[in-house]
Image: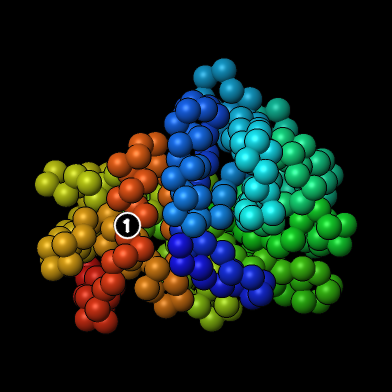
Amino acid sequence: MKTLPLGNSGVEVSAFCLGTMRFGSAHDETISSRMMEMYIEAGGTFLDTSNNYAFWVKDCTGSESETFLGKWIKEHGNRDELFVATKVGFNTPAIGKSLSAATIMSECEKSLQHLQTDHIDLYYAHCDHRETPLEETLTAFDALIKQGKVRFIGASNTRAWRLEEARNVSAQNDLAEYCCIQQRHSYLRSNAGVDASVQLEANADLLDYVAARDITLLAYGPSAHGTYTKMDQPLGGSSAGPDSDARIAALKDVSSETGATPTQVVFAWMLQSTPPVIPLLACSTEAQMQENLAALQVTLSAEQMTRLTDAGV
């Protein structure tokens, strides 16, 4: 597994992060365990979860993913070999959306218990909760770092201008800074004016910002819900239109030239972007995991990268 720098944190993480949102809930223990095994056998160490995964699944409360990971890691005795990320902010319905200091502190303790660990490697603000002052949120995160319960902090579903506000608050108050941003991001882009609700897309402004500020972008939803496995079907939804038509044409051409699947080309395009983007893998079958991991072996030429990036209107 290749590794990439995590912003200005000084550490490197796996080039693919394993998303575990459905582990222990929609994916049973057998499937979840097999996905973990395949990822780690490939050299991956970067795991992503949250304090609310996956409360929306029938009979689930929102602690299932963290609890599964904690049990699995303890059984395998490999906590020191892994880089574990979890989140706070959206929370479970009983708590509600919040990034108050009290919520951060109490939810961190719960996550540590679920994960059966004494520290979280990367702790995300899962959303931008504007009702809570940034100074309060960042002071709480900074306190957790000083206590040794958290190593690094990141943001998610946050606009570029708010990341800059947070950076300034951290600098002015000598607080820890966000080293990364996890945002919805794929090769196809949503049409202008599309309301993504709480799942913010990595728009051109954010991409420009992370490049300028040495903040790593982690892409959730990089496979666009399986869109790239159905390239022979008409595209619908928020991405349908001339922009996506042009990008699909470029993707098909590069896929044909390289012999890689469209999904593999998309992942390779992310990894070879400047700066590199770390995709989150969301797999439920061995075939999916094998295809995704094989993208690490795909090398795109400078001309192919330019053609892919510049396609569209």
Q: Quadrant of the C terminus?
A: bottom left
Q: Return the x and y of residue 262 as percentages of the image width and height.
A: 22, 56
The answer to which of 304 and 191 lies nearer the viewer is 304
- The residue tagged 1 is 294
Q: Return the x and y of residue 132 as percentages of the image width and height.
A: 75, 52
How many C-alpha atoms fall within 10 Å of the one at disc 1: few (<14), some, or many (≥20)?
Answer: some
Horizontal side of residue 207 vs 237, given as left or right: right
Give the vertical position of 35 relative to 133 (above or below).
Answer: above
Q: Residue at x 28, y 66 (%)?
A: 298
- Tag 1: residue type? Ala
Q: Return the x and y of residue 258 as percentages of the image width and height.
A: 17, 67
Q: Residue at x 42, y 78 (%)?
A: 274
The answer to which of 88 and 27 lies nearer the viewer is 27
Instruction: Tell me the quarter of the picture where residue 271 sits.
Output: bottom left
Q: Residue at x 67, y 66 (%)?
A: 178
Point out the residue furthest to the top here: 59
Horizontal side of residue 238 vs 246, given as left or right: right
Horizontal side of residue 94 vs 47, given as left or right: right
Q: Is residue 164 visible?
A: no
